[in-house]
Amino acid sequence: MKLGVCFSARQTGRIAIAKEAGFDYVEVSISEMSDMSRKEIDIFKQALGDNGIPCEAANCFIKGENKVVGKTVDYNAIIEYLHKVLPIAFDIGIKTIVFGSGGSRNREDDFPEDEAYRQVTAFLRDYAGPECAKYGVRIAVEPLVHWASKMIHTVEEAVCLSQDCALDNVKALADLFHMYENGDDVANILKYNNQIIHSHIANPPKRRFPLRADEFDYKSFLDNLKSVGCERCSIESGTDDFEADAKAAFKVLNSLR
């Protein structure tokens, strides 16, 4: 399993740190990159090449204002957005994009849950999935903590959604923080062989970098992911000292993978 670390694409100085720490790849926000100038993107791409580390994954697929659920879904705007971000992803070499995007997929309290599910399925099946396939990109559906989204909270629900899409490039993600907050047992991962293609990890109670192997049961999470064929795991968490925490966290996770 490959290990990666998340940060802003504008924080290009972190690329060298990630490489020196030992990470296999980096992960950034594709929605943030959609707002970057061509010069900024080229600087990021050059830093990847200079340091010999790829950007294989991206998160934050859809901006909050581009609703895929609710009464005001604008498919023309969604298509326009996809046509903007996917060439960027292809240019950078991104292989997997995470569909968390709580603001985009969240439904209003009075909006029917079954209709919201139909809409998000249609978005992935009819729009995002086929467009991503043109660029060799896979989508990892991310279950989110309850306060971030009113739908898709567990790995089981993410897998079911991906299966309802019936596309080879739409699968699921497991995130240790969200699983912990939602009471989703990491043992549930073992039910879904070849259905979970990407993962996120952090020290769940505080969503910080994992700094010691004995502070949480990271091993069970990683072992279960490996058992079902998950290819990558990225650290997605807060930090007050990226360099020190990235190096310490890689040592911990590398000893467990």
Image (tube, rainbow, N blue to C red):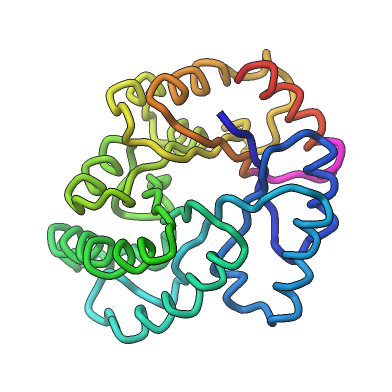
Q: Position of residue 224 (x, y in %)?
A: 43, 20
Q: Position of residue 179 (x, y in %)?
A: 43, 33
Q: Is residue 221 above or below residue 34?
A: above
* Lateral position of residue 24 relative to residue 60, left or right: right
* Lateral position of residue 5 relative to residue 111, left or right: right
Question: In the picture, residue 23 is in which quadrant?
Answer: top right
Q: Main secondary structure of the magenta part?
A: loop
What residue lies at 33% left-to-right and 32% top-to-bottom? 194
For the residue pair 79 and 235, the one nearer the viewer reads as: 79
Q: Is residue 187 above or below residue 182?
A: above
Q: Quadrant of the C terminus?
A: top right
Question: In the picture, residue 195 is in which quadrant?
Answer: top left
Q: Is residue 98 above or below residue 31?
A: above
* Lateral position of residue 192 relative to residue 101, left or right: left
For the residue pair 229 and 7, the one nearer the viewer reads as: 229
For the residue pair 92 and 159, the one nearer the viewer reads as: 92
Number of marks in the image?
Answer: 0
Instruction: Report if residue 134 lies within the magenta region.
Output: no
What residue lies at 36% left-to-right and 85% top-to-bottom? 77
Q: Position of residue 12 (x, y in %)?
A: 80, 60
For the residue pair 87 and 120, the one nearer the viewer reads as: 87
| Magenta extent | 237-244
What residue lies at 47% left-to-right and 31% top-to-bottom? 180
Q: Position of residue 159 (x, y in %)?
A: 27, 40
What residue lies at 28% left-to-right and 68% top-to-bottom? 108
Q: Quadrant of the N terminus?
A: top right
